[in-house]
Amino acid sequence: MTTVSVEVERPAGEVFAYATDPTKFHTWQDGVVSGSMESHGAPAVGDHCRTTRRIGGTQRPATSELVRLDPPRAWSVQGIDGPIRAHVDVDVQPLGAERARITISVDFDGRGVGKVLVPLIVRRQARAEMPKNIARLKQRVEAAPRS
């Protein structure tokens, strides 16, 4: 498991909203091409999050199920298809009215060829990318127009 954390100079609600919006994943996550949430209205546990990533020169879609939702504090998804299935936990802790600490934890399960790729490549790549991703997230959230 890889866990990263950073303090952001924005209210917890703004940090949570940006970090858990799949349509914004491409702005701060390395390799993400697009993202969307399949829900009828406000997101709810059981809804599906679809993300397309650029991996090895090709675009690969992945579907995750929303398994925890407690805005503006907690959000978790679990991969449900493909050979590499991510488990992502996002926790946002308010640090007063205008600051928050966001912690993101990521781990993976492998199926088929993914059983080999997860320990050899995927976890190592996540450990290298996550500090850059969370720094980019901080930058984007702090630069976003105030809600």
Image (cartoon, rainbow, N blue to C red):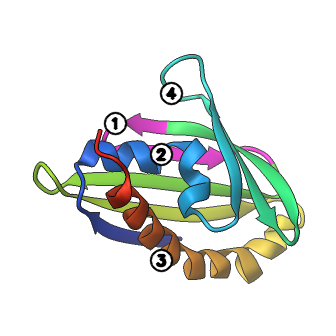
Q: Position of residue 93 (x, y in %)?
A: 24, 54
Q: Residue furthest left?
A: 96
* Residue situated in front as seen by the camera: 29 or 143: 143
Provide the residue designation for mark 4. Answer: 43
Q: Residue at x 79, y 46 (%)?
A: 81
Residue 8 falls in image quadrant: bottom left
Range of residues picked out in magenta? 68-81
Give me the C-alpha separation between circle 4 and circle 1: 10 Å
Q: Position of residue 129 (x, y in %)?
A: 58, 76
Q: Is residue 72 magenta?
A: yes
Q: Position of residue 99 (x, y in %)?
A: 19, 57
Residue that appears at 50% across and 27% down? 43
Q: Are marks 3 and 1 in contact (CB under 8 Å)?
A: no
The type of residue carrying mark 2 is Thr
Q: Are marks 4 and 1 in contact (CB under 8 Å)?
A: no
**Circle 3 residue:** 131
Pick whichever of labels 2 and 4 is earlier in the sequence: 2
Which mark is first along the chain, 1 or 3?
Answer: 1
Whether residue 101 is in magenta: the answer is no
Displayed quadrant of residue 127: bottom right
Report crowding for label 1: few under 14, some 14 to 19, many 20 or more residues within 10 A (C-alpha).
Answer: some
Residue picked out by circle 2: 20
Left or right of 94, for residue 124:
right
Query: Label 3 to label 4, Cα distance in Å?
Result: 27 Å
The answer to whether any part of residue 3 appears in the image is yes
Q: Which mark is residue 71?
A: 1
Give the Cα separation between the discs numbered 2 and 1: 10 Å
Residue 7 placement, left or right of 35: left
Helix, strand or loop at label 2? It is loop
Q: Residue at x 83, y 75 (%)?
A: 116
The quarter holding residue 101 reads bottom left
Of pointers 4 and 1, the one earlier in the residue sequence = 4
